[in-house]
Image (cartoon, rainbow, N blue to C red):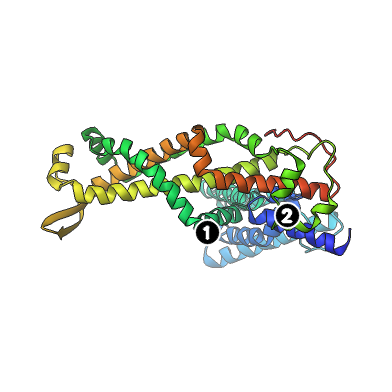
Amino acid sequence: MAVTDEAVVRETERWFLKRGLPHFTADYNAAQDIWTRALPALILLFLVEVAVNAPSREFPIWLDVVVVAAAFAALGAVWALVNRARRRAAFARPDDVGVWEVAFFVVVPALVPLAVGGQEGAAAVTAAINVFVLGGIYLSTSYGLVPMTRWALGKLVRQAGTVLNLLVRALPLLLLFITFLFINTEVWQVASGLTWQALLVVVALFVLVGTGFAVIRLPRQIGELASFESWDHAEQRLHGTPLEHVLDEVGEPPEGTPALSSRQWGNVGLVVLVSEGIQIVLVAVLVFAFFVVFGTFAIERAVIESWIGQDPDRLATLDMWGQELVLTRELLHVAAFLAAFAGLYFTVVLLTDTTYREEFLEEVVDEVRESFAARAVYLAYLGGGDGVSTTVSPT
């Protein structure tokens, strides 16, 4: 492949990454593309944990220093022995990070407090932190969560006028239904009686149910997004992309493009979920803001007191036009409760109602289909377009 061809491929792969689809690149390898790049940060965290866990409260300071030095020396010796066994320089950085290296990172720092003073609690916390860190690194890097979110938010900002227009269409229907709940005594009694912790749990349950419903709908959505009327139709979507100038060099694969692997399917699913989730969160935030403003102006303190049976917890008071405007804790609770409910309701309607889907997800659908078209041409350009059927499956 010529230098110019290589440049097109690399630019296309960066284009996939910016859209949160790193798994669309050919020969994507977690050991080389994720863990190896994250290795410096992992080593730093590893050394910090060893330095923190090695000292013991029962030891004098000088003995703690000796223990830490001994721990570092032992780790250095193990590192050198492993490298020599793999015929590398003693203190060379690994070319790739596999299962054994990952297990070493999780287990060894947790063993240090056990070896020093039998500190089971510290060992368990250290291991849990390491698993959480590794999971966060893998998800954010492997599935491009950061560039994916940046792309979705950028799309939202670039088309703010369109989004606001769509929200104006959605909010009246939502508010028409939910406003009746807002002036319902039972809702105030339930929501206002919740602590902040309990309210967060309730909101999280709404989010969990909505996310579960969206995940269930993903196979059908991705199957629809991956389909094209024709090869020419797929190519038409790529004007303005890095592949635009090589379309004439690419022929249609005889049996379509290869099906998505499980990781590619999950990558596309995350892009769809994040894109939909940003719109849903925006709707919920606007509903929350509306009810806070509406409740401050329309619901007097005496009315709230009659609903909840006690004097509300006032957070701020303002006299305006001869009326006392009161912002209460109870109002914030009710607004948050109804905003979470509105988000769940909007999720269900968005994914089941054809009209809502066409109006709110049109931009998302076009962007994802453009990515599928780019993948088809990209694989054909690499000479991998003579694969299997275009049937898309999460397995």
Where residue 2 sits in the image (x, y, percent)?
A: 88, 61
Instruction: Give the mark nearest the N terminus, 1 or 2.
Output: 2
Q: Which mark is residue 366?
A: none
Where residue 307 sits in the image (x, y, percent)?
A: 17, 37
Residue at image point 69% right, 49% down: 237
Crowding around mark 1 (Cα neighbors within 10 Å: few <14, some 14 to 19, many 20+) is few
Crowding around mark 2 (Cα neighbors within 10 Å: few <14, some 14 to 19, many 20+) is some
Residue at image point 64% right, 65% down: 69
| Foreground disc of the pair 1, 2 | 1
Where residue 70 sits in the image (x, y, percent)?
A: 66, 62
Residue at image point 80% right, 47% down: 379
In the figure, is residue 15 to the left or right of 355?
right
Residue type indicated by callout 1: Arg
Considering the image in quadrants, where does the N terminus appear?
bottom right
Residue type indicated by callout 2: Asp
Query: Could one spot residue 107 in this view of the protein?
Result: yes
Q: Which mark is residue 33?
A: 2
The residue carrying mark 1 is: 158
At mark 1, the secondary structure is helix
Q: Nearer the viewer, residue 189 or 275?
A: 275
At mark 2, the secondary structure is helix
Q: CA distance from mark 1 to mark 2?
A: 31 Å
Considering the image in quadrants, where does the C terminus appear?
top right
Q: Nearer the viewer, residue 98 or 386?
A: 386
In the figure, is residue 305 to the left or right of 27?
left
